Image: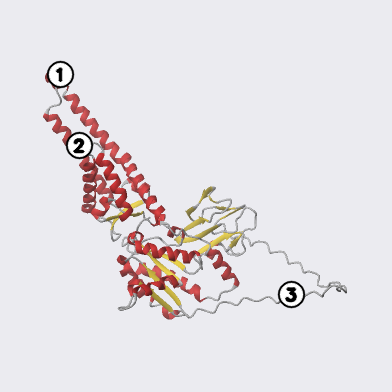
Amino acid sequence: MATILEILQSKYTVFVGSDPGNDVVFSDGETSARHCQISKVGDNSYLIVDLSSANGTFVNNKKIEKEFITESDFITVGQNIFQLTKKISAPPADQPATVANTSAAPPKEDEAPPKAAPPKEEKQAPPPKSKISVYFLSAPEDENTCIAIDKHLSTIRFNTTVPIEINGDFKIPAGENITQYKQKLFEADIVLVFVSVDLLNNDECYERLKKVIANHNSRKTTLLPILARNCMWKATPFANLPLLPRNQQPLNNKQFWNSEDDALTAVVDDIYKAINEFNKPETKEIKQSQAISQKSILEIDWRKNYLWKVFWKRVAASLLDGLIIGLPLYLVFYGLVLNQLSAQGDYYDVYDYGMSEEAAFQIIFYYLLITAAQILIYAFMESSSWRGTPGKRIMKLQITDNAGNPIKFQKALVRNVIKLLIGAFTNIGNGVIVILYAIAQVIAYSQTKKFFHDQLSNTVIGERLN
């Protein structure tokens, strides 16, 4: 039997379980019918997802829900331990069916002769498709990317035996009934979803995407997510699907791709493979494989959980930054203050009242110095190759501009000055403004999916790229 690595050369996802329709079948009692799935996401990088199995999926003896793995990792499913590159022995052949004895005793005189069983109706295979419908779903901000992909796809339309019809919001003809045209999205064979922060934040796209996911779950369409621009996509259902490009680099990442054509070509090649799947004859084995693959159910109403996963991830990154950067700086500040106060000890004894004006100005100077140092450290790290502070690196986040490009030092400086001014303003009013600010921040975040300083500085927080 072929290795999992060899199977992944010809299809996006390999399914493992005890059901005969899986790509890899284990017959032991501890393996669930639909146990896990493995997808290739990059060079020597794969994503394994447990499909709510009864006994769990393990990678290197660690129980996982989903995990990025390599060819050297050991996977445990039921009583089976294997690697992607090792051949897996074929499951034992089924026992031949026992043939019933057809010689029956003649019926008694008072018994009616047995009725012949009606012939079984053979299910006819569905007629071949006359065309393959592909729909581009994106936010308006990503329409230029859709146009570029459409242009590259035009070269493969002549290499397919079945005509390809490409639709999308960017292709709506003048004078067309827009509402009626957009219904083609829910009738498409393949839906290309261009993932970006604008798509995730767009309410209309979200409502349409919920229907597309429902169609995916009910086997009516194939959903292919494309990472147009970096964003917090790992908290979305797309993390459970093979993401294009397979190396998970956004199409607009100029630091990775040699040119825009290289990025688009990598995606179009995978789209071409998906389209070819519709041209293959639907043999029994292919039907079984499709039936299993479609059991990868995605959450339909996913945004509610997504927003708060991202929110608390951001909060955790801020707390880590406070411990790693803020705490040492303010320990230095309080050390300078204590040193200044001890130097003024004789002054207090003689004049019997608070610190001198000179000492007060000195402490204010220390505070401004420490604050400026913190702003500069944050700005330097966010504009460097790190693209974020230590807390964001630990939480695997990074900062870019709205187009997904690294931010320059000036923009990072403005971003942190805005954050400082907002923080300073909230410290006025004995905590009342702090509470009002927190409420306003949560309300604004639920509406715009951004914090105030991100909105004002036009920056975006996304998943960290390798």
Q: Earlier in the sequence, mark 3 or mark 2?
A: 3
The structure residue drawn at horizontal position 21% and vertical position 47%, both measured from the top left corner, is: 417
Q: Which residue is mark 1?
A: 349
Q: Earlier in the sequence, mark 2 or mark 1?
A: 1
> Left or right of 346: which side holds 252?
right
Amino acid beneath label 3: Ala
Estimate the spatial distance between the alpha carbons at disc 2 and disc 1, rounded to whole Å. 26 Å
Q: Earlier in the sequence, mark 1 or mark 3?
A: 3
Badge 3 vs badge 2, beta-carbon distance below 8 Å: no
Instruction: Tell me, for residue 117, which label it has, or none.
Output: 3
Residue 319 is situated, as x and y percent measured from the top left of the image, at 33, 42
Residue 289 is situated, as x and y percent measured from the top left of the image, at 56, 67
Residue 66 is situated, as x and y percent measured from the top left of the image, at 48, 53
Amino acid beneath label 2: Tyr
Which of label 1 and label 3 is nearer to you? 3
The structure residue drawn at horizontal position 23% and vertical position 44%, both measured from the top left corner, is: 420
Instruction: Tell me, for residue 306, which label it has, or none.
Output: none
Q: Which residue is mark 2?
A: 367
Amino acid beneath label 1: Asp
Q: Is residue 131 or residue 324 the one in the foreground?
A: 131
Position of residue 356 relative to residue 420, above or below, is: above
